[in-house]
Amino acid sequence: MHRNPSRPLSPHLSIWRWGPHMLVSILHRVTGSGLSTVGALALVWWLVAAASGPEAYDVFLSWAKTWIGLVVAIGLSWAFFQHMLSGLRHLVMDIGAGFEIRTNKFWAWMTIVGSITLTALLWLTIAMDRL
């Protein structure tokens, strides 16, 4: 069997036109990985610090209150909302709905817009409580 070297063996990213549905699919994998690694480490650190006493918890808070801690917290909350909304989109698709290209792209955009909106609302609420 001879293969034409100018053609890929199977569909590849280089022949597909990028769209929001592809981005959301990739973000779903990335956010899942981030939540299960960075999120799990942050959660375990928080739980161990809380169980270890006031000094250990103060160390955790001193890191959490820095700009890096804030970026990580905001990033994890966005990843949570993005992963959740993308998962709900996939759940609907698993029952056989939403495969029409316009519908699929619309809900892909809505997962992105929704995750950013929910993240902003969460952090605005947190900021308002601190005033």
Image (cartoon, rainbow, N blue to C red):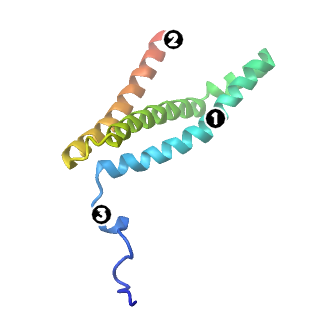
- Closer to us: 93 or 72: 93
Question: Based on the displayed image, in which of its 4 quarters is residue 56 positioned?
Answer: top right
For label 2, the residue is 130
**Label 1, label 3: how far apart the Cα atoms are:** 35 Å
Percent coordinates x, y for residue 93 in the rendering:
32, 42
Count neighbours of disc 3 (C-alpha within 10 A) and say few if under 14, some if 14 to 19, many if 20 or more.
Answer: few
Q: Earlier in the sequence, mark 1 or mark 3?
A: 3
Q: Is residue 12 above or below residue 8?
A: above
Percent coordinates x, y for residue 50 in the rendering:
73, 19
Q: Earlier in the sequence, mark 2 or mark 1?
A: 1
- Closer to us: 33 or 9: 9
Q: Nearer the viewer, mark 3 or mark 2?
A: 3
Which mark, residue 16?
Answer: 3
* Residue at 61% over, 39% down: 38
For label 1, the residue is 40
**Could you tell whether 115 is left or right of 68 in the image?**
left
Percent coordinates x, y for residue 126 in the rendering:
48, 16
* Residue at 49% over, 42% down: 31
Looking at the rendered structure, the kind of residue marked 1 is Ala
Which mark, residue 2?
Answer: none
Question: Based on the displayed image, in which of its 4 quarters is residue 65 positioned?
Answer: top right
Q: Is residue 2 above or below residue 126?
A: below
* Residue at 70% over, 24% down: 47
